[in-house]
Amino acid sequence: MILPLLLLAGCSGVQSALDPAGQEARVVARLFWVMLLAGTAIWLAMMALAFHAARRRAQPWSERGAVRLILWGGAVVPTLILAALLVFGLGLMPTLRAPGQGLRIEVQGEQFWWRVRYALPDGRSLTTANEIRLPRGQRSEFLLTAQDVIHSFWIPVLGGKMDMIPGATNRLVLEPEKTGLFRGVCAEFCGSSHALMAFSVEVMEPEAFEAWLAAEMAPAATPRGEGAALFLARGCGACHTVRGTAAAGRIGPDLTHLAGRHSLGAGILPNDAATIDRFIREVDRIKPSARMPGFAMLPPAETAAIAGWLGSLR
Ligand code: CUA
């Protein structure tokens, strides 16, 4: 009773390949269901044959009957079934190989977060992290690579997964068909915090996407104040960029509009000032082997001020 319920729980939700919200995922889901049904039918036929064989063991096959069984059951029918499934599968390929149009997004896997750069058709670009927003109904092209070890980029509701390999660039095209908030994950073991490497995916109507893009291009909402001064004084800017301030580090995630993201720490925590504070102090415990050290040695009032400021950057 519990097992089927558990299995069914995988059929919907923000991270289910069986609840597609994009063209490529729909193709993958169709392939899955056809293969599952065909496999089930073949299994049932084999079970029926096995029962039949067990029952008629008393009367052995005639030589001609046995040859015919081996020829048809062992060669002709399996070849026809496998050929039909192959033709069906190959027929799905062209949709998955179609070129992109317009938006190009470079995503780089890092231990354990995602560097995201939008390259717009008009030549402008935008760097952000750990969240991907996409316009509905457009074929967006992803260029995937990695900084340190092999990761794998996977948004199950939008399409298949693709490896991110240091020194190489892999290409993936996705066309979202439904708006909504979804989830992507790293699908290749990449270190202690591999399971803590996810990201939010929001599919928006094209107008809403353009408005978001314009807001995201702007520098930080509040570039000054106590929290901003402490952020710079404590050296956070050596690794992080906050556009509009002197912080221009390139090692860690860009934090310019951190508070506008759906989640914190690459898809694993709620995004609010209290959690940002905890993340700054205990990142070594929250994300083992992350390159950012925990800053528990700083006075609590200082990290609270920094977190309060970061939590205001919409
Ligand atoms: Cu990155 Cu697993």
Image (cartoon, rainbow, N blue to C red):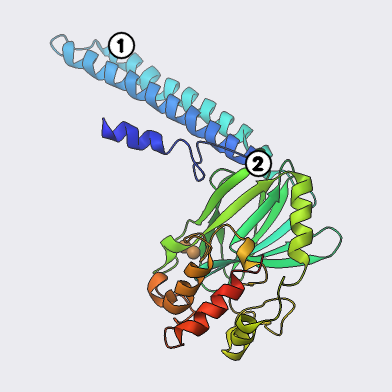
In the structure shown, which secondary structural element does the residue marked by tag 1 occupy?
A: helix
- Image location of residue 177, percent across then percent down: 67, 38
- Category of crowding for the residue at label 2, using alpha-carbon neighbours closer than 10 angstroms: few (below 14), some (14–19), many (at least 20): some
Question: Residue visible at 60% across and 39% down?
Answer: 21
Please, what secondary structure does the residue beneath circle 2 have?
loop
Q: Quadrant of the N terminus?
A: top left
The quadrant the C terminus occupies is bottom right
**Residue 265: mark:** none
Image spot of residue 208 (x, y percent) = 75, 48
Q: Position of residue 213 (x, y in %)?
A: 76, 58
In the picture provided, is 80 more to the left or to the right than 288? right
Q: Is mark 2 within 8 Å of ligand 1?
A: no
In this rendering, is residue 92 above or below 268? above
Is 308 placed above or below 215 here?
below
Q: CA distance from mark 1 to mark 2?
A: 62 Å
Dividing the picture into quadrants, the one containing residue 62 is top left
Q: Which residue is mark 1?
A: 64
Front residue of 44 and 257: 257
Specify the amino acid type for callout 2. Answer: Thr
Question: Mark 2 or mark 1, which is nearer the start of the sequence?
Answer: 1
**Residue highlighted by disc 2:** 179
**Mark count:** 2
Q: Amino acid at mark 1?
A: Arg
